[in-house]
Image: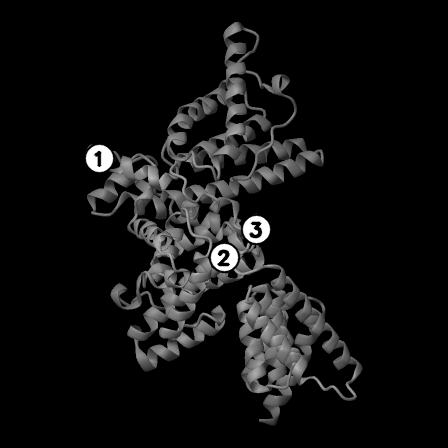
Amino acid sequence: MADSRADAVALETEGNALYFKSDFGAAHAKYSAAIKLDPKNAVLYSNRAACAYGLNRYLDATDDATKATELDPTYAKAWGRRAAAALSLGRNTDAIHSWKHAIAVLPTDNPTPVQAKQRKQYQSDLAALEARIARHKPNELPVPEAMEVSGNSNLPWLLANDMIPGLKRDQNWGSSVSALNTPRQRQWIMCTEVCMSVSTPCRISFMCSQILECFTDALVAEFRIVRMPMPTNIFEMFEKQVATQARNMNAWLQFGAQRVMKEVPRRLEKEGWSSVRPALSITVRGWIFRGFMADCWESNITAGLDVFTSALEVLKWGAEKYKDVPLHERGAIFEPTYIRGVNTVTTHTIPLEEAIAGANEIIEELKDVPIGTEGAAAAVARGEPPGFWYAFYPYPKGLAYSLRGRVYDQKAKKLKAEGNESAAVDLFLRAAADYKQAAFMHPQDDGHRAWYLHCAFHNQYNAGFPVRRLMRTLDMLNETLPLAQKIWCDPAHWPRMKPHFDLDMNIRENMKCGVDSGAVNPDLPVKMLLGDELDTMTLL
């Protein structure tokens, strides 16, 4: 035992040195090794919490800091770290509670200089949070622009209702309308309609026992579902519903991925899949909901990334560890399609450079997915909704290509600004090719197809493509725009994209007139007409 303690102290010392060099990953590993030797040492858990916080893993930081306070309720620094992690996750009540504990356990008589500094810092942090909360009354959080669409009849999901019967009759699966008709999307639309018809806000979260499952599964299938009109207080109700379901199912919502991966096998051994399956479902879906809230509602990108990453980490771990367990026992969340869908949602939060590995993985995994309606028709023949096929096969692949295209585009512009023209041209070429592939993964009437063709054209132009090839891309965009606008004309996105489409069409008309009049050689670049460089926006 003495040797174990001595080894733990040595590991802690090494961890401390790494921590002060901001090598949080290596320090975390040292503290983890020390905890195995000295599992009741509150300082080790608190230090590991600090490392997790430095890595933006706030769930894990909260978990370790909580463990430290359980081992030593008088440990002020652990309470402070728990508060900081809770604040980063948007858990304001928990942060206030923790800072008050941190202040309460510090001595008021003859404190050391360190303790006096801690008290001052915790009091300042607590006061700042309470002042911020006081400035916002309940339900006065800013509404994301994408959600300011309540009552709009031009939403794609509402327009699709009138078009789907005809598509089914004609067996036309080559429309993006088909992708707007998955069972979860229909259930989510039903839930929002029910919620909006309820006059008493406190009843909203209990109108549908599956409301969390409906929302997260619809979100995973098609991220644009967030454009649906929703009552402004629905997410406050969601928070209550998630908490209620988590308590009922004894879920691990407050823990990080590492803790969950330890707890699942333990509970399986005692209670089996009948207990673990619903607990895991609520945990993962609760994380997805929390990540969406943090990213889209609160503009807290790092917190969104943390919980999305935790969800993916647990899903990939479970898919491998329990791959031989029948689907009806372990549940659908470990299926490759579901993991792919969560990965797609996560890419809205992950920095582009970090998303490249995931994009390449999806492209490789789906390398045999056919372009066009062939895959959707085959899905229907198998008895699957075409929307399911679009959501979990070509759409994720299209998003992966677009992510890679954005990285190439940004790197190319940086190289060009640095004077490295030849290397920039090579990356513009790659970006154009990837954006075009992204466009082809979507039906001709999908708004994404139009935007990706726009991005492909701009990169082709910056790469110095001749007029003839630029015209081909613009002709495809010209064919897509009127079809896409019929479905994707909602006010959340289309008005911001339309000026760029209008510019593209003006360029097309000018080039066509120039070629027809003989003033423009179609086999030469067109930069003499338009200037030096066209800019490519990120997808809105």
87 shown above or below 296? below
Instruction: Report the residue at 79% width, 88% height from top.
Output: 110
* Nearest-to-viewer mark from 3 and 2: 2
Q: Which residue is the extreme one toward the front? A: 199
Front residue of 290/366: it is 290
Of the residues shown, which amino acid type is indicated by label 2?
Met
SS assignment at label 3 = loop
Q: Which mark is residue 171?
A: 1
- The residues tagged by marks 3 and 1 sit, at their Cα atoms, a distance apart of 40 Å
Q: Distance between the residues labelled 2 and 1?
A: 38 Å
Q: Mark 3 or mark 2: which comes first in sequence?
A: 2
Q: How crowded is mark 3: few (under 14 residues within 10 Å), some or many (20 or more)?
A: few
* Tag shown at residue 351: 3
Q: Is residue 500 above or below residue 276?
A: above
Q: Which residue is drawn at 61% across and 40% down?
A: 410
Q: Where is residue 9 in the image (x, y as percent from the top left)?
A: 65, 85
| Spot occupied by residue 428 in the image (x, y as percentages of width and height) | 57, 33
Secondary structure beneath label 1: loop
Of residue 124 and residue 150, the one placed in the foreground of this image is: 150
Residue 122 or residue 131, whichever sits in front: 131
The residue under label 2 is 293
**Amino acid type of the residue tagged 1 in the rendering:** Gln
Asked if the residues shown at circle 3 and circle 2 are in contact, with their CB atoms under 8 angstroms apart, the answer is no
In the rendered structure, the answer to whether residue 239 lies left or right of residue 514 reads left
Q: Is mark 2 on a helix, strand or loop?
A: helix
Q: Can residue 47 be seen in this view?
A: no
Q: Which residue lies furthest to the bottom in this view?
A: 2
